[in-house]
Amino acid sequence: MIGEWINRLGRVWVEGQITQINRRPGASVVFVTLRDPVAEVSLAVTAARDVYDAVAPPLSDGARVVVLAKPTFWMTRGTLSLAAEDIRPVGVGELLARLERLKAVLAAEGLFAADRKRPVPFLPRVVGLVCGRGSAAEHDVLENARRRWPDVRFRVENVAVQGPLAVAQVTDAVRALDRDAEVDVIVIARGGGSVEDLLPFSDESLVRAIAAGRTPVVSAIGHEQDTPLLDLVADLRASTPTDAARKVVPDVAAEQHLISQLRERARRAIRGRLDRAQQMLDGLRRRPVLADPTREIDRRAQDVTALRDRARRCVWSALDRAGDELVHTRARIAALSPAATLQRGYAIAQRPDGQVIRSADEVSRGDELAVRLAEGRIGVTVSEI
């Protein structure tokens, strides 16, 4: 009866914002989710392919449109939808525009700056997980993390991840985990969804709460193409919840393999160093000075004996030359000595004061002189000149 009553309604013009487009290849119908940003109400719209393709420019998520549609009631699911007959774009989606303005404000305050991001610990003691109750995201994070590191511990906070209660619950859960001294990293995880479903993770109060915390936060919201503001303020972004599990805990198998490689590398390095030291030691042992130490001593003893004999010869030669020089000097002195002249029969006449008389003109008759002979001395008086 409800379906019959709705089917009797006429066509209506509906204005709203596109939050999701599902265009299946080969299908003759395109499914669109239309949202009223004021009343926070969403409605499914079906449009024939030719009606959808006739819109220029092409529609995208966030576009504001007016739709001429006929209400339709799906009795099997008990839902109301609109069958579009005409779609007209009316400007840029207010939702995305508001998010862009908020993004610019937060970026200007430095909340997205790279220098404020905190490093994620290599092996956290406890991992805080904020996710929906019994969600696929919770299962993916827990299962993949424990598969990688079986001893990892989690503190799970189940919250609403969409709807009017999501922002407050996620914010309270993050603050509670941040106050826990054992929690080293917080993961906020949610599966994929429409732009409308992911709106809580772009809320300003949640973004500021995460920026003010002390614990590193990993964002794992939606799929790779989804980029809520939480991804920008988080210390680390994961493309999916599964990727978050890979980034917060190490792989025990990979770490064991790395340790084995490092141990083998260290073993090779130590073995190589020992081999080089052994080769150097063997080389030293093969040297003659170590192979037969007395040989070098004998060689040095021979050198000392040769040097000693050479020194002795040098000394005797010097003494012989000095003796010959002394004999020659004595012979020259003897040859030049007045005593030698006196030995040949000559005499030296001197005054009493010792002055030698060299000429007869130097004396007068009656002068007393001393005559020195080879043997002795006599006194004479000059009687004739």
Image: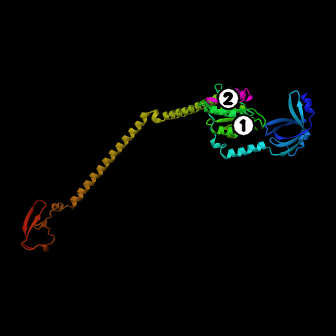
Residue 250 appears in view: no
Q: Quadrant of the C terminus?
A: bottom left
Is residue 211 shown left or right of residue 306? right
| Secondary element at tag 2 | strand
> Which residue is depicted at the point 70% across and 26% down?
143
Is residue 344 shown left or right of residue 83? left
Q: To which quarter of the image does residue 80 belong? A: top right
Residue 291 horizontal/vertical position (percent): 47, 33
User: Which disc is residue 157 wearing?
Assistant: 2
Residue 221 horizontal/vertical position (percent): 73, 35
- The residue carrying mark 1 is 201
Q: Nearer the viewer, residue 306 or 330?
A: 306
* Residue 337 inside the magenta-drawn segment: no
Is residue 262 shown left or right of residue 330? right
Q: To which quarter of the image does residue 245 belong? A: top right
Q: Residues within 10 Å of mark 1 (few under 14, many from 20)?
A: many
Magenta range: 124-145
Spatial distance from mark 2 to mark 1, Cα to Cα? 16 Å
Q: Nearer the viewer, residue 41 or 376?
A: 41
Sequence-wise, which precedes: disc 2 or disc 1?
Answer: 2
